[in-house]
Image (tube, rainbow, N blue to C red):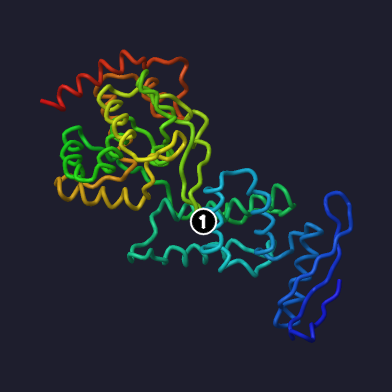
Amino acid sequence: MAVIKNNKTGMWEVRTYYKDLTGARKQKTKRGFAKKSEALEWERNFKLKENQSISMSFKSFVDIYLTDLEPRIKRNTFLTKKHIIETKILPYFGKRKVDDIRTSEVIQWQNEIMKLKKDNGELFSPTYLKTIHNQLSSILNHAVNMYGLKDNVARKDRTMGKEENKEMEFWTQGEFQRFLECVADKPISYYVFEMLYWTGIREGELLALTPADFNFEKKTLRINKFYQRLEGEDVITDPKTPKSNRTIVMPDYLAIEMENFIKSIYGIKTDDRIFTISKSYLHHEMDRGAKLAGVKRIRIHGLRHSNISLLINLGFSALAIGERVGHEAVDIQETTLTPWTWMCGILMCWTARDG
């Protein structure tokens, strides 16, 4: 290795050689260090990483952790973890050697994190605090399991935060109808919320829908993809879980409404997204409609809960409901929600809705 000064730029750089996975000798050059000491520190950490020494800086090990992790999880999950690491963990432990981090330092870090506030001035929820702590523990677990760290000091101390048992938010059918009347002045809002309430699909599943997903002869809806906004781009991914791939039977009136709505969209193609709105639009419309209707404001996901509550009240089994909403936790042995039983149940609701 060599640490030299570039006389043209006045900056320091490191030139070194290493062997890749195939054993081939490769050259690595790192430029842009303002001080020689910074270049020497980078050189030291590079050597430790190449030798897989756990005495490297925590920041250098995080680079390894993220490289190992990225191919194994979904992109949005990876970005969430990366954000937590970069904003809540690296500022505290980045310069420390991995094998020098002590339990007492973890406690001090917890105390600092628990003082942090969101943009609205509120403290982080116990659930989010637990997520942050679990991320630190996950990094150190990786060091223990794969790179020879003796102990995960984040597991020795009490964890930060806790899982919250949140009350399930949902609307009754009457509350939903009052809300729907207040957003019906915007056709796209009307159809969006009709779909969310009567089918129980997830927000990302809704925003990924295309005309090809509807079979209006059979009155069915295919769920096989998920919409996300990642790094400023619209991204269509696989569904949330394998069980999320499913076909949903729609009530007659919803099938008719959606068929007419899709026909009204000028120039739409078979594989075009139907609802090209943003998640912030949905949240704004929830705020507006709930306020005008005088009903409690629930989360968008609460409409999924509302659909489940509706099906429970109609007498559908947990297995049938689990299959319809694509819930991974329910192990379904066979399909129990047939088009006929669904339509009989929904007819009861439709009668009440019109009454």
Position of 316 with respect to 35 (left or right) is: left
Q: Amino acid at mark 1?
A: Glu
Q: Residue furthest front?
A: 267
Which x, y percent locates residue 49?
76, 60
> Where the N terminus falls, by quadrant?
bottom right
Whether residue 340 is situated above or below residue 143 in the rendered picture: above
Which x, y percent locates residue 308?
31, 29
Residue assigned mark 1: 231
Which x, y percent locates residue 39?
75, 76
Image quadrant assignment for residue 43? bottom right
Name the foreground residue: 305 vs 220.
220
Dot 1 alpha-carbon crowd within 10 angstroms: few under 14, some 14 to 19, many 20 or more = few
Residue at x-position 66% and y-position 63%: 58
Name the foreground residue: 108 vs 86.
86
Position of 72 with respect to 227 (left or right) is: right
Q: Residue furthest top?
A: 340
Position of 58 with respect to 314 (left or right) is: right
Whether residue 48 is situated above or below residue 287 in the rendered picture: below
Residue at x-position 25% and y-position 18%: 345
Whether residue 179 is situated above or below residue 337 in the rendered picture: below
